[in-house]
Amino acid sequence: MRRLLGSFERSLSLLNAITDGVIAQDENDQLIYINDAVAHLSGYASAEAMLNVSAAELTDRLKIQDEQGQVLTVSQMPGRCALSGHEVPERELRYVNPNTGEPSWLALKAQPVFSLDGKVQFAVSIIRDITQRKQLEAQTIELLAERERVKVLQRFVSDMSHDFRTPLSILSNSLYLLQKNTDPEKRQTHAVKAERQIKRMEKLLNELLQSARLDENKVSFQFRQTDINTFLEPVIREYASLATEKQIDVQFVSDYNSCAACIDPTEFDHAFRNVIENAITYTPKGGCVTVRTTTHDQQTIISIRDTGIGISNNDLPHIFERFYRADQARSTDTGGNGLGLSIVKRIVEVHKGRIDVNSQLDVGTEFRISLPI
Ligand code: ADP
């Protein structure tokens, strides 16, 4: 008997010596055993000071939350779940450390303890404070995010320098030739060239600003129920007349039913113009651009199809990325900067719509904007 008692006392002092917290609770949520580590983690002086504390009180005191920040009651705690006879795998839970008042983390694993006749006697939970590890993980994630931000910034600065350097050098060259030349016709040519580069830089700056405003949610969208055919018709007519210069035929095939959608007229106009301008830009002389509206499955669909240079399968997944320009576009001086489609996508998404693209190199491209009716 003395040997048995000796071994029981040794077990208790062993349990008190370990740094992990040990809790045993019965089916009435009474704490039948806790070691000193639990007491210290819970802000009590010792395990004895917790004699009359129930599992529910302890859960409330620690303000335990799950991984998603949902506050847990004692019935949702692993200890209670283990009382139904199943081992509960380790869970990482948040809690408020009563010693510091700081949000902290613990890992908790619970398992049932059975009597000889196979009935659950009580549940044992093992608790470990993992706040330091969690803080380290959060710092590592923050560091990686910071590195990614620096990388994005470096790429942005390099893209921007390139996008401004090209028009600036053409501009300075044109101004030099404008000063040198006396022939009025040549002077006129250089003046037109210079003006085109100024417009290009102006467009770049406007798109950069628009992109930043959309990123920061600073664009306030004013949605209005709109008939899309009536809305698009004058814009397409405008581009049809501009495209005659390039001998491109622009057609509008509107659904005979009215196509309604809730849009912000200014922002949507901006998005649509971007896509139709691209279609005309990337279609060679003699080609055709067709805008078609249809309704399908509670969606109004605007298709903008061209018979232009097309986009290769390699480039296709990237064209909505900021500053991305396909090889074919880079090799022609269209004055583009690769910002347009990223802005279009963002605007369409704010309208709860989507934009898809299909293209075949040297055959043509189709963009489809779908908007909920
Ligand atoms: P950009 O100012 O270069 O036109 P966008 O963001 O509007 O920038 O388009 C990104 C890229 O997608 C273009 O550089 C071009 O390579 C490709 N692209 C967009 N529309 C078309 C189109 N209709 N036909 C062929 N390529 C297109």
Image (tube, rainbow, N blue to C red):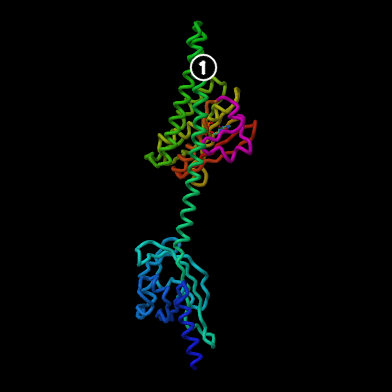
Residue at the outermost top position: 182
Which residue is nearer to you in this view: 280 or 252? 280
Residue 304 in the image: x percent, y percent? 54, 34
On screen, residue 101 above or below 117: above
**Residue in the image at 46% along x and 38% along y:** 258
Residue hosting label 1: 173
Say whether residue 52 is visible.
yes
The part of the chain drawn in magenta is 308-333
* Quarter the C terminus occupies: top left
Q: Is residue 287 above or below residue 71?
A: above
Residue 334 is inside the magenta segment: no
Report helix, strand or loop for mark 1.
helix
Q: In the displayed image of the protein, which residue is found farthest to the bottom? A: 1
- The percent coordinates of residue 369 (x first, y second) are 51, 39
Magenta part, dominant SS: loop
Ligand 1 is found in the corner quadrant, namely top right
Q: Is residue 251 left or right of residue 43?
A: right
| Residue 255 appears anywhere in the view | no
Closest to the observer: 187 or 274? 187
Residue 202: percent from the left, percent from the top? 44, 26
- Most foreground residue, 236 or 335: 335
Residue 264 placement (x, y as % from top left): 40, 38
| Residue 347 falls in image quadrant | top left
Q: Amino acid at mark 1?
A: Asn
